[in-house]
Image (tube, rainbow, N blue to C red):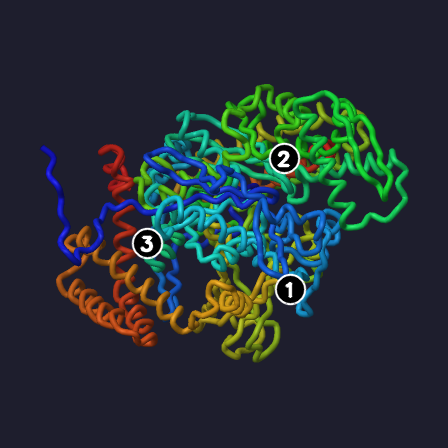
Amino acid sequence: MALLQLSEPGQASQPHQRKLAVGIDLGTTNSLVATVRNAFPEVLTDLEGRAILPSVVHYGEERVTVGWDAREWTVSDPLNTIVSAKRLMGRGVNDLKKLSQHIPCQMRQQESGGMPYIKTVRGEMSPVEVSAEILRVLRSRGEESLGGELDGAVITVPAYFDEAQRQATKDAAKLAGLKLLRLLNEPTAAAVAYGLDKGDEGVVAIYDLGGGTFDITIIRMHGGVYEVLATAGDTALGGDDFDRVIAEWILAESDYTGNLTPELSRDLFRVCCAAKEALSSDTVTTIVINLGGREWRAELTRELFDQLSEELVSQTLRVCRRALRDARIKAPEISNVVMVGGSTRIPVVRDQVTGLFGREPLVDIDPDQVVAVGAALQADVLVGNKSGDDMLLLDVNPLSLGIETMGGLVEKIIPRNATLPIARAQEFTTYKDGQTAMAIHVLQGEREMVADCRSLARFELQGIPAMVAGAARIEVTFQVDADGLLNVSATELSTGTRSSIQVKPSYGLSDTEISRMISESIEHAREDVDLRKLGEAKVSATALLESLEHALTEDGEELLSAAEREQIQAAMTQLGAAAAGDDLAAILRETETTSNASNEFATRRMDSSIKKALAGKSLDEIQMIEEN
Amino acid sequence: MLDAQCGRHSPPWTVRTVINNPAGFQFVAITDNYFKLFGLATDFSIDTDQLAGKYRELQRSAHPDRYANAAERDQLLSVQYAAIINDAYQALKWPLSRAVYMLRLRGVDVDKEHSFDLGPGFLMQQIELREELESIRQVPDAAPVLDRMRHELEQHQASLEKSFARSIVDSSAEGLEQAGQAVNKMQFIVKMQQEVERIEDELLGL
């Protein structure tokens, strides 16, 4: 007979309660949200049963619409209908000149540089805000479907996204009120979706041709560990470019000399996209388009389309070869090729990829859904629903990070394809007597000249103790975390003075801009900023207390003396009392005290867990270490 | 990847990690020897499969993915540890970076202060190779030439590795000198290999 478990009133929620987590594929053209339910990944649909949410936001006089409804406006109200906002993320106005033909909208570049804003009837919007609108819709789809507030989300990004583009995506998540567990590379997500299905071992190539980006990733799979060996890509090559070659062909064939208005441009791309999709199954399709009042009609064969797209496909194959080279893998060693992204449905793409790797690519999982599915599986592990023992993703830094040196040259600090997280220290000195500040310009890219790389940020180190020229030794640590985001810290070594760092992102949003956007967004309109800060402080205090309680129960006896334990517990009691109240300053102060009091404990735990991981294998090996 | 192989920017061999907390910095040593970190004997001839296996085990316990839900301090700590494990793995994974690291354990930093006398013969040979590479763009069918050069460089590299393995276990000053020379020569060879790759890339239109 089954016994009913009754919980007492006021009892805390059960420790093993499943947490609600989703994986989000924030795509250029389409976005999706998926979750893991009853051990199976599931793509969540809207009320009409549609999985796909078009990545389109319409800013109307009355209201903002997202997705299918917004897409209705693309032709009639193109300037207020933002498509492909992902292409604008983390970009500057110069990058956008290339893209402006795809994205008919009006931009305003900020005077201070930084991210361009799009003019709409509802005011100027940054691409981050546009993406946040899409994320909000996916978030509420997740919450309605799972029946509660989300504990966390994994959002995917193209592997080849640079730091600025990743930071922009993280900012969008923050604006949308999502707790971001990880930015996951799309190809890695795809590998996870396939890998857990099949328990594959070996080296896998993920060929990801999405709406606006292409990347290729080489992954070694071994006992649930996905080790990315290399990734390469082109952030300005995607399905849209296949539409473009058709559009160019139409304009050339039709001798159309009239204006390419935003409306016509949109209509042209709609027709081209439809033709491209038709040619995935048919060998010929009829194109009908209204060109400035004149109906133009023509047949486009698959053969001709293959010819038109030849250069695009060749470009992707060149990138594949470079990735193989970087991974030190030869094409025949690849045991599986996974196709991701709707554009891999194009027959000539499949043929060419088959030719390069000498094997048929895997297409079992819907290429539109595979990324969201992988993200959901990873979110389930990260949020703590599943033991991490069976899966670990080791991803890489896609583009080299460096700093500007004399003569406009870039000195690489963190190489591309280095496994993340990674930290590198670099020493600098002063060149003038009494110099107390120093500027550092961080760039990303493979080229030697500053002008050919992407500027990520300028840092100003301040508070360097005044000394004679060359006497100060400033160690700057560049760290790229598991999300591919850069952190910088600096210390003057001879005095131990820590320099403060002011960051001026070249394309991203400043912290002030983000705060303003959060306070301006509809959701937070009536919310007091101080109240939000208090809430955040309480959450982080509680997280620290919970994790310390858990740590003390597990390792307190073993790793701490009675006095040390008492000291930590005293700090925790103080923090607990502060967190129960509403004094923000007190909570922050006690959080810091408790954190400092337990730093040594946290470090000992980490050391001990590493020793255990090492000892887990065989006794002989441990003996060998001791002899060492 | 190639930069990582050369180990140019590797941190000093007494590794320390930094906890970035509001009060400032705290330095923690996790290991004074990467080999020990992986439970391996300090030996140039390591089993790279075993190394890879140990690496995966360590990352399973230290990687930030295991701390995605933990307190912020623990997340930062995990990033530091995982970064050191990655660094250690890169240092030991490739023969050249492993050799550079072993010299560092002996107190010699080949990247910074030391250069060894490589003898006129070796340098002449390098100059000739470089000249041959420079002129290769004029050769109608460069691929077989590049293949041959790559093969020769690989053989040369293998014999330098053997010489290093012999010298590094010799604790005399002469042994250290020979080990240093082998590392310096390997650095030349790796640079040349990179050059060959760069020209191949160019010819492939990459």
Judge depth for marks 1 and 2 and give the one in front.
1
* Label 2 close to label 3 by CB (< 8 Å): no
Place of residue A518 in the rendered image (x, y in percent of width and height, measured from the top left): 50, 65
Query: What residue did someone put label 1 on?
Result: A124
Sequence-first tag of 1 and 2:
1
Q: Nearer the viewer, mark 3 or mark 1?
A: 1
- Residues at marks 1 and 2, CA–CA distance in whole angstroms: 40 Å
Front residue of B69 and A34: A34
Q: Position of residue A50 (x, y in %)?
A: 51, 38
Report, in whole angstroms, how far the alpha carbon at label 3 lies from the one at label 1. Answer: 37 Å
Residue placed at 48% from the left, 42% from the top? A46
Instruction: Give coordinates of residue A447: x percent, y percent.
Output: 68, 49
Q: Which residue is mark 3?
A: B70
The lab-note entry on whether marks 1 and 2 share a chain reads yes
Residue A154 seen in the current view: yes
- Taking the spot 51% from the left edge, 39% from the top edge, the residue there is B96
| Tags 2 and 3 both on a single chain | no
